[in-house]
Image (cartoon, coloured by chain):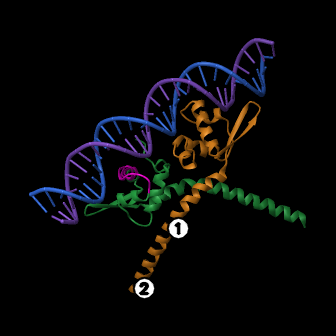
Chain colours: A orange, B green, C blue, D purple
Amino acid sequence: MRRDIFQAIADPTRRAIITLIALHAMTPNAIADNFNTTRQAVSKHLRILTECELVKQEQQGREIYYSLQIEKMKEIDKWIDQFRKIWETRFNQLDNVLATLKKQKK
Amino acid sequence: MRRDIFQAIADPTRRAIITLIALHAMTPNAIADNFNTTRQAVSKHLRILTECELVKQEQQGREIYYSLQIEKMKEIDKWIDQFRKIWETRFNQLDNVLATLKKQKK
DNA sequence: AATTTGCGCAACCAAAAAGTTGCATGTATA
DNA sequence: TATACATGCAACTTTTTGGTTGCGCAAATT
């Protein structure tokens, strides 16, 4: 079973769950109420998110509150970073081109 | 067929292809040589990447050069941004806590 | 002109994932 | 203690996906 963060965020429902619990911990039932799915389906998504450590749980009586382990999201940011470098470089190059054009105009 | 950028980057081979062609356009055969797959498999990945506009192609004779449409990568960055805001806020809050502790120490 | 090469596309197959159903378990509540 | 929730988990079904094979087409090469 492939379980990495990129695979985890591939599913739109999981992305929505992530956003939903980013600020406040929620129970599976409460989460399911926000979507067009069953509790079980949400439960499965939560298991996947837990498996790749994107989510942590906290039991409170018979309820289990799930919340986002936001640090983990930085892994995606880290991967994007290599491309950020590229697009920033390109932007600067464009900047240089514009500056050169301006100079020539003078 | 669901075709969005998050689904596109879910596959590790596709992520590798993206990184590979980020700087230089490459042909399917050249890309396949870098991995442990066939040209056809790469071709299929390229089709998926093309469908969600992550990749552009340029024909040159009988060869087709594929390169990354890096602007599209910003969409992921944009999604991550909501979480970046959260973790930066938390970091600042921690900063405040540390500052307060320091003050009390004095 | 014949052959080789680079490629896309469609059909197929196996594996994985998403969702559903039916439990079992533990915690509240009457 | 009996009942009603809240939940996880395992089995099963349906879809989706990644890969392979076998074309066909067009551009290069001979």
In the image, is residue B39 above or below residue B67? above
Work out which quarter of the rendered image holds the C terminus of chain A and state it: bottom left
Mark number, residue A2: none
Q: Which residue is mark 1?
A: A85
Q: How many marks?
A: 2
Specify whether D9 is left or right of B22. Answer: right
Q: Chain of mark 1?
A: A
The residue depicted at 45 percent of the width and 53 percent of the height is B14
Q: Quadrant of residue A32?
A: top right
Mark number, residue A103: 2
The residue nearer to you, when weighing D12 against B57, is: D12
User: First in sequence: mark 1 or mark 2?
Assistant: 1
Q: Quadrant of residue D21?
A: top left
Mark 2 closeness class: few <14, some 14–19, many ≥20 residues within 10 Å? few
Instruction: Kindly report which numbered mark, 1 or 2, lies closer to the viewer in this rendering.
Output: 1
The residue depicted at 60 percent of the width and 45 percent of the height is A18
Specify whether B87 is left or right of D29. Answer: right
Q: Amino acid at mark 1?
A: Lys
Q: Which residues are magenta?
A: B35-48
What secondary structure is found at the residue carrying circle 2?
helix
Question: Magenta segment: does it hold A52?
Answer: no
What secondary structure is found at the residue carrying circle 1?
helix
